[in-house]
Image: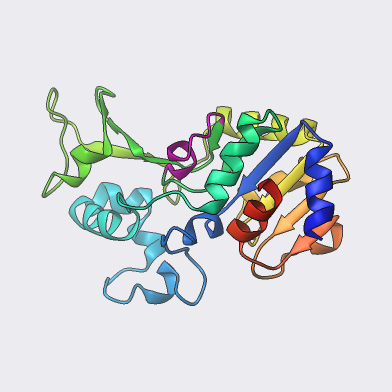
């Protein structure tokens, strides 16, 4: 199957990649729903993860939100893995037109990918809720309590989509357009169960859907190729 995937990629210059948490687990960033994921292992909080990462928690329990967010969602020492590097190479070759990701870690950009559409935002962008001044991740991590704007005193909020918040419509619409127009759609590291992001696959009009995920998905029977394997291993073999 590797040879078949290599042939598909070699003959296309309009590939789109759509990835989830499984792309980053190979950089030692935990996912949410697996046996070692955040939802399974987070026992110490008095609230469930869905609340700790919600807009309500950010507003009502801001101290606890930041304590949880910084310990569970931010991994500043993580490095790009084989999957990130392979995708960056495909983009440089002119084959990959866009990376659409549910991850917020910025590892695609660190691997040199340029056109990255972040459906759930990024830990590397943070803004004052009052004056919208920008702050880097270091500002959040170096603040012991609630990060406040050094100009107006407003709370600095990560530019990530929390529970109860909507996806950025511009990012979502761009993602839909790329998927609609793609010749090849590679979906990796996602179980395709979390909506609205999982619904993006419905916009694909082509006949070269490639699924790379360690577990089965509801779309396996619609794919041209299915790899129940490490996404980093599959993509690195294809690109190399």
Quarter of the image for the N terminus: give it.
bottom right
- Residue that sits furthest to the front in the current view: 240
The x and y percentages for residue 36 are 45, 74
Residue 131's place in the image compared with 36, above or below, is above
**14 and 103: which is toward the camera:** 14
Q: Going 53% across and 46% down the picture, which residue do you hit?
A: 84
Q: Going 66% across and 70% down the picture, which residue do you hit?
A: 215
Q: Is residue 24 magenta?
A: no
Is 138 on the left-hand or right-hand side of 187?
A: left
Residue 115's place in the image compared with 194, above or below, is above
Q: How many marks?
A: 0
Residue 35's place in the image compared with 182, above or below, is below
**52 and 26: which is toward the camera:** 26
Name the image quarter holding residue 161. top left
Region rendered in magenta: 106-115
Residue 196 showing in the rendered view: no
The x and y percentages for residue 145 are 12, 49
Is 53 on the left-hand or right-hand side of 184?
A: left
Q: Going 36% across and 48% down the picture, which residue do you hit?
A: 55
The x and y percentages for residue 4 are 84, 53
**112 and 34: which is toward the camera:** 112
């Amino acid at each position: 199957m590797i040879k078949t995937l290599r042939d598909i990629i070699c003959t296309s210059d309009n590939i789109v990649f759509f990835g989830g948490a499984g792309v980053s687990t190979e950089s030692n960033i935990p996912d949410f729903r697996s046996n070692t994921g955040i939802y399974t292992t987070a026992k110490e909080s008095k609230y469930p993860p869905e609340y700790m990462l919600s807009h309500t928690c950010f507003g009502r329990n801001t101290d606890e939100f930041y304590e949880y967010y910084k310990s569970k969602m931010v991994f500043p020492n993580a490095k790009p893995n084989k999957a990130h590097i392979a995708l960056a190479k495909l983009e440089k070759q002119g084959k990959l037109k866009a990376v659409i990701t549910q991850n917020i870690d910025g590892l695609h950009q660190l691997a040199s990918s340029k056109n990255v559409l972040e459906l759930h935002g990024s830990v590397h962008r943070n803004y004052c809720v009052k004056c919208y001044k920008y702050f880097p991740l270091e500002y959040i991590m170096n603040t012991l309590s609630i990060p406040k704007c050094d100009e107006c005193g407003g709370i600095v909020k990560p530019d990530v989509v929390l529970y109860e918040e909507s996806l950025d419509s511009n990012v979502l619409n761009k993602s839909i357009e790329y998927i609609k127009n793609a010749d090849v759609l590679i979906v990796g590291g996602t179980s395709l169960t979390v909506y609205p992001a999982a619904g993006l696959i419905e916009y694909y009009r082509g006949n070269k859907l490639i699924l790379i995920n360690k577990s089965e998905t509801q779309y396996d029977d619609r794919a041209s190729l299915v790899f129940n394997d490490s996404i980093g291993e599959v993509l690195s073999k294809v690109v190399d």
